[in-house]
Amino acid sequence: MPDIDDQTRKLAGIAYGEASVDDDPDEIGGIAFAVANRCRAWGGKTVDQLLSADPNYTYAVSDGNARFGKLMSSSNAGVAKDPGMSLAVEWARKALVADGTDPSGGGFWWDGLDFKSNYAHHPKVRDGFRYGSPEHNIFDVPEARRPVTIWWQVKNKKTGQLVNSSVRGKYDAIWVSTAAHGHTIFWKHDPDYISATSGKVYR
């Protein structure tokens, strides 16, 4: 195996650490692409720059994840001998240059088994989410729609207070799924949410 540069190894470690132990190629590849997609959208950041800008993006790098630690500490030869780790490196290399099909479906975020086990308290359930396709509902949990109306505001000439004027936009989900593989669902922001709030697709 060729030498593994720092950014490729970090990305491979994240993909390998965050994926389930089944080493599903599309699950590992989807996570690698999701990270790389967000890097590209956020001004072409490196993986390290992305993690610095959003320290809570992936906990595999900070919570003692055994698989992440294994890949990060293994020699090139050790990585090459392990099917799962070598697969993660292969996908990291593809993801960093956007080579081939993106298993995440253009996603920037992902959730694993905790999406089901912590469903009642999960941030995406609180925010509002929908499935981009019924096939993405791999954990058999319902959508959580949260209708929101955003108004343009103007200053009342008599009172000087800001009051609602016309509707700026509406949305009922902040998150929409883009793909699902193995034990992972991939996400991006719902376009209606971005349009209504003038938000950033990568934040």
Image: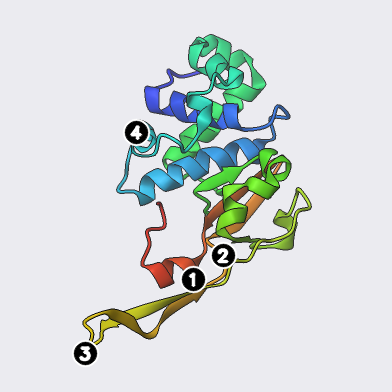
Q: Are marks 1 and 2 in contact (CB under 8 Å)?
A: yes
Q: Between tags 1 and 2, which lies in front?
A: 2
Residue 192 tag number = 1
How far apart marks 1 and 2 lie (CA) works out to 8 Å
Q: Between tags 3 and 2, which lies in front?
A: 3
Q: Between tags 2 and 4, which lies in front?
A: 2
How far apart marks 2 and 4 lie (CA) works out to 27 Å
Q: In the picture, residue 181 is in which quadrant? A: top right
Q: Are marks 4 and 1 in contact (CB under 8 Å)?
A: no
Q: Between tags 4 and 3, which lies in front?
A: 3
Of the numbered discs 3 and 2, the one sitting upstream in the chain is: 3
Residue linked to disc 4: 52
How far apart marks 3 and 1 lie (CA) works out to 34 Å
Going by the image, does 189 lie left or right of 44? right
Q: Identify which amino acid the numbered label 4 is placed on.
A: Ser
Residue 158 tag number = 3
Q: Residue at coordinates 65% horizontally, 39% vertically from top-left?
A: 112
Of the numbered discs 1 and 2, the one sitting upstream in the chain is: 2
Q: Identify which amino acid the numbered label 1 is placed on.
A: Asp
Work out whether 6 lies above or below 173.
above
